[in-house]
Amino acid sequence: MTPEAFATKWHGSQVRKYTGENCREILKGVPHTEDTKCALMEMHVAFGDDITFMVLMLTECDKSLGNRAARKVIDRARLS
């Protein structure tokens, strides 16, 4: 499956909260799973180890971990 088809399947008409931009258009070529019900196994089958690892690193942490500011602290710590 191409990244474009993957983005369309999982994001459809979803838009970004702060800008209103269509997620599918922004994410073409950048597979990720946040804000979708996509299983990482499906991503792994479609794109392999390296892409799945990158996606895990770049996908924002779960919203249950706190407000946006707290989640950004967690995300920055993970990426540093």
Image (cartoon, rainbow, N blue to C red):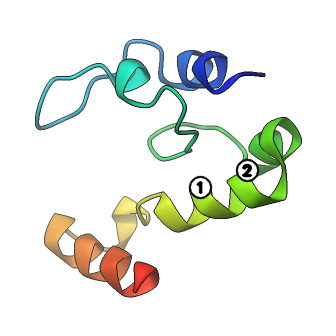
77 in relation to 27, above or below: below
Residue 59 at x, y percent in the picture? 48, 57
Q: Which residue is disc 2 drawn over? A: 40
Disc nearest the viewer among 2 and 1 = 1
Frontmost residue, 46 versus 36: 46
Q: CA distance from mark 2 to mark 1?
A: 9 Å
Image position of 67 (left or right of 79): left
Q: Amino acid at mark 1?
A: Val
Which of the labelled discs sits on residue 55, or is there none?
A: 1
Residue 26: percent from left, percent from top? 35, 28
Instruction: Using the image as rendered, state which of residue 14 and residue 48 is in the foreground.
Output: 48
- At x 24%, y 32%, the residue is 16
Residues under numbered marks 2 and 1 in contact, where contact means CB atoms less than 8 Å apart = yes
Label at residue 17: none
Q: Is residue 2 left or right of residue 8?
A: right
Looking at the picture, which amino acid does disc 2 mark?
Answer: Leu
Please report whichever mark, 2 or 1, sits nearer to the chain's N-terminal start.
2
Q: Could you tell whether 38 is left or right of 77 in the image?
A: right
Where is residue 36 drawn, in percent x and y?
Answer: 52, 37
Q: Which image quarter is the N terminus in?
A: top right
Residue extending farthest to the left is 18
Label 1: state its secondary structure: helix
- Rate crowding at label 2 as few (under 14), some (14 to 19) or many (20 or more) other CA atoms within 10 Å: some
